[in-house]
Amino acid sequence: MPADSKFPEVSPVVTSTEDIIHWLRERVIDEIECLVPDMNGMMRGKIVPREDFISALTSGGLRLPETILLQAVSGDTVNDTKVGAETDRDIVAVPDVSTVRIVPWYEEPTAQVICDCVNSDDSIVDYAPRSVLRHVISLYEQRGLRPVVAPELEFYLVERSVDPDTPLTVPVGLSGRKESGRQAYGIEAANEFDHVVEDIYAYCEASRIDIGTMAHEAGPAQIEMNFKHGDPMELADQVFLFKRAVRKAAIAHDMYATFMAQPHQGEPGSAMHIHQSVLGRDGVNIFSNEDGSDAPPLAHFIAGLQRYVPVAMGLVCPNVNAFRRIRMESDAPINVHWGRDNRTCGLRVPDSNAAARRVENRVAGADANPYLAIAATLACGLVGLEEQHQPEPEVTIDAHTLGVTLPAHIQDALLSLSGCDPLRKVFGSRFIDAFIEVKTLEWQLYNRVISSWEREYLLLNV
């Protein structure tokens, strides 16, 4: 769907500092948003005037407190940390000029750029999410391999609400009515929100976010949008920017868009399915033999996912709400059985030709940090390629009948992740410790809140 006349300019592909300086001045872009993804995939950073930004480009970057990487989703900061300095020292945000894009919803010309984090001695901040994904990709490169991914992201449109104690409600569509029932793949149900979707596509085109197909999902006003396959870092960057673009498009039409994994009670949750394949030095998919049959690395990759995705659940389902999606009566997977074109399994091998053979990880929630979710699933598969175990037998029935084998709560997931030596070896202990610190702080904050369920059933009954 092409961008309309409201967003005539598409962000350029910039490859050098000289190119970005020329483009900023030529387009009279006065402000640049310098974005750093934190542990939750939230945008931290600074908004910088153009000439100050150009000075920062030539002087090494922008100084930011290290604690931006140790903030909870609430904004609270980890105090007793194994990883960050007690002095709350500065780190440097170094703009990745290849990520510069227009911010299409502003009236005044504004750019955005994603930054990497380095220390004052120019060493990378190894526990920053973008650093973590880059490290996992480098482990593939060291073995002569190149991973390819394609995320699919689900989200809900909901009515605007300022009261967090009030359940979310379905927004009014173009017909003037609220959607009821479950219209999975319904064309007319999707048409109800064409005005929002058209702006999403327009924002994405202007921001160089390569969206493919969209579909109405099973929940009311639930939409799925698919990204075209490509480089893991590029796709993580696109998902990172996409979430904000979707939220801005919804607000422009007096709605909210939410990537909460389970925003509605009794409705389907929202996932981030990650399709992944691996190419060898010759650019050929290592999951297929020359005759088109399955190659042994496919089995090893699946075995790695089966063994380690449950351990890495904290990375792909990173919030207390995410575990509400993993339940018996849901469409979401409850285990890591695998099957061919079997959507009840946590791991699905879609029908495809040999070149496109891939594994879809269906466990991750839409709320996951895209850098960490992609890094996690690729890491699990990489360990599988190295260990060369065989997966459990293919499942050809409804995998929900085989029981729940995934962790039931974020606490269980964090405990498993903490004690997993193979994943610590891949990610590094500094990242594992930092991530667990942030998520433990969030659990502590969550656990102080008294829920409406407790007031309803415990107030006068116990």
Image (cartoon, rainbow, N blue to C red):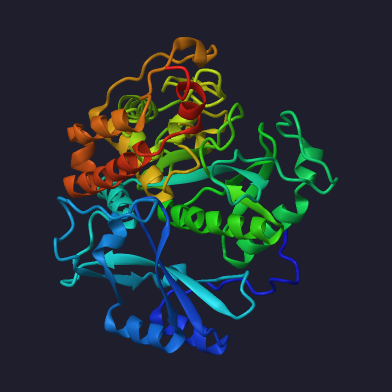
Relative depth, front residue between 308 and 290: 308
Residue 136, x across and y down, in percent: 29, 48
Residue nearest the observer in this picture, 60 or 173: 173
Asked whether, in this view, residue 170 is left or right of residue 173, the answer is left
Q: Is residue 135 left or right of residue 267?
A: left
Spot occupied by residue 27 in the image (x, y as percentages of width and height)? 57, 85
Image quadrant containing the C terminus: top left
Q: Quadrant of residue 342?
A: top right
When the figure is inspected, residue 206 is found, relative to residue 455, above or below; the finding is below
The x, y position of residue 90, in whole percent, is: 22, 70
Q: Can I make out residue 17 in this image?
A: yes
Task: Give the tally of numbered discs.
Answer: 0
Residue lying at 56% horizontally and 49% vertically, measured from the top left: 228
- Residue at image x 75%, y 67%? 4
Q: Is residue 179 above or below residue 456?
A: below
Q: Please say if 310 is above or below 187.
A: above
Q: Is residue 188 left or right of residue 307?
A: right
**Position of residue 63 measured from the top left corner of the image (x, y, whole percent):** 28, 75
| Residue 75 or residue 331, whichever sits in front | 75
Instruction: Reply above or below: 122 against 298.
Output: below
Image quarter of residue 337: top left
Q: Quadrant of the N terminus?
A: bottom right
Residue 311 can be seen, yes or no: no
Farthest residue, direction right: 175
Residue at left 70%, top 31%?
184
